[in-house]
Image (cartoon, grey):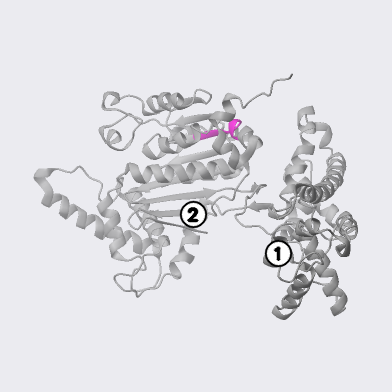
Amino acid sequence: MSKVSGPDTKQIQYDRQLRLWGDHGQKALEGGRVCLIGANALGTETLKALVLPGLGSFTIIDHQLVTLADCGSNFFVHPSMIDQSRARVTCELLKQLNPDVHGIFIDKPSIDDLLKQNTFDFSQFNVVITANLPLNTLVILANHLWTLKIPLLVARTYGFIGTIRLQVVEHYIIEAHPDDTIPDLRLDRPLKSFINHCNSIDFNNLTREEHLHIPSLIIQYKALQYWQKQTNRTDLPHTRQEKNEFKQILEQLSNHSAYDINDLNKHVENFEEAKRTIPSHLVNTNLSLIINNLFHDRCCLELSNQSHMFWFIINAMKLFTQNEGHGLLPVRGEVPDMITNTNSYVKLVEIYQEQAKKDCEIIYNYLIDLLKEHNRFSTMTSNEQATLHELVHIYCKNASFLNVLRTTSIKNEDDLLQKQIEQIPLESSSDEFESDISWYIGLRLCDLFYEKFKRYPGEFPLSTNEINIDQRQLEIDFNDLKQVGKQLLNCDRQQNPIRENILEELCRYGASELHSISAFIGGCCAQEAIKLITHQYVPIDNILVYNGIRQSASVFKL
């Protein structure tokens, strides 16, 4: 008698996340390489949330030494570590969280010197993350990564405000995992095998037990045939009146000679389910606007030997849609749960999965032809060739939700912010909810303040004996920040569109780093990094702002 093998250690350790992104997603994560610039509280919290789920490797770049301020916000340092390399001590402690993760650090030279020398290879990473990096350094790094087409996540915390900015030239979303999807059942253009199966069922000669367990999908198809015949139509019912007519046919089909008129056991749940699922099952099957845009994207139309595999598969899928698919994407091969017996449900699943398998095979053949046509197939390793079939299967299963994300570059952000500023109303009540874009613009003003004064507004040594002096300095910083704002905004508006209470609050923060805010933003940033590495779920496009005062978050696009 053969033994049934149970889950291995890795499956037990990563059980929860495997339910989110599957074995192939975990494999991609374990092959991921992340570079973190800045081992402060925000940076270490971000890496912690990547190390625990099994990131492949990380590199920390930080030339700073541990300070007393670090000990007040960063749980990965201790007062005994003051004046030691912050990159080294945090790297050692982070590796202890998961022995499977490889980590190294660079504490000399600084990130500024690395960028000047231009000898460090950033192209080895799947994603680069910065934590509270000064604007001047950030812009140079962002430009370099934009050229290399390496995704950049800019994380920042400033008092009670936290932000994440994504810069990516082109990111491919393969498994979007949408929250609510309409099943791919195609009652308006039913599969031939499905039609044959439905026609093999004689409603007039069903036993009571068979009648009670007909899948609602077959019931809907039968009712649709009757409705189309009565109305002399070939489409689906759309208006309320048409759907009411359709429901009346369902009601007629629910009657059976085996039921007595006073039968209290007449619980035809499958027919009730057929009525309930009309909005999700009786829908037109069309190409979405996003998929249509992908088919007409320049990268899809102009394939070359250097094109990403994403575009080769999109092109193969387009060829299928234009030919065998008759204008439709490959069948997804999934059937929602329904009230029926096991055999009836399994038969339906087999019908759709068999068609999905055939469609996938056709697209795979188109892909091989395209790869050979562009002299790409011969340059692939045997392992890459062997995984193509599984890759095509994943694409076909998620064909309706494939997408590409292209963000703006950070070097153009000031011009983009100007457009946002023009949309901010000048007049507002004192208790009006502050828009998160205003906080983001306020942080940009703080960056410009830093460039001018080599410190952030409100950032100065606090002395209990000189509180009045500190208060006066705070007022000076506030006025200077307003002047910086006028220079950035560079507009003829008499009133500053960024309200003074926002600037006052930012001055009061003094660029302080709160652990609770860093932990939240770090966790969010790690999630975005996982999306980029696994190509699953949809990343932010392209700025997230967290307001710790109101405990709210919003995403907007520049």
Identify which residue, 516 or 144, lies in the foreground.
516
Q: Secondary structure at mark 1?
A: loop
Read off the residue under disc 2: 543
Q: Residue furthest top?
A: 1
Q: Amino acid at mark 1?
A: Lys
> Who's the residue at 76% across and 38% down the image?
390
| CA separation in Å, label 2 and label 1 | 56 Å
Closer mark to the observer between disc 2 and disc 1: 1
Q: Amino acid at mark 2?
A: Ile
Identify which residue, 408 or 349, lies in the foreground.
349
Sequence order check, earlier mark of 2 and 1: 1
> Who's the residue at 78% across and 56% down the image?
209
- For the magenta stretch, what is the residue range? 29-35
Q: Where is residue 542 shown, x and y percent of the image?
A: 53, 54
Identify which residue, 500 or 53, lies in the foreground.
53
As drawn, is 86 to the left or to the right of 179?
A: left
Q: Where is residue 116 shown, x and y percent of the image?
A: 48, 35
Q: Is residue 134 visible?
A: no
Circle 2 crowding by C-alpha within 10 Å: few under 14, some 14–19, many from 20: many
Above or below, comparing residue 250 to residue 509 in the picture? below
**Residue 557 falls within the magenta-colored stretch:** no
Q: Secondary structure at mark 2?
A: strand
Above or below, comparing residue 510 to residue 480 in the picture? above
As drawn, is 340 to the left or to the right of 95?
A: right
As drawn, is 272 to the left or to the right of 111?
A: right
Question: CB under 8 Å between callouts 2 and 1?
Answer: no
Read off the residue under disc 1: 266
Above or below, comparing residue 465 to residue 438 in the picture? above
Q: Where is residue 14 shown, x and y percent of the image?
A: 55, 32
Identify which residue, 186 or 450, lies in the foreground.
186
**Residue 31 falls within the magenta-colored stretch:** yes
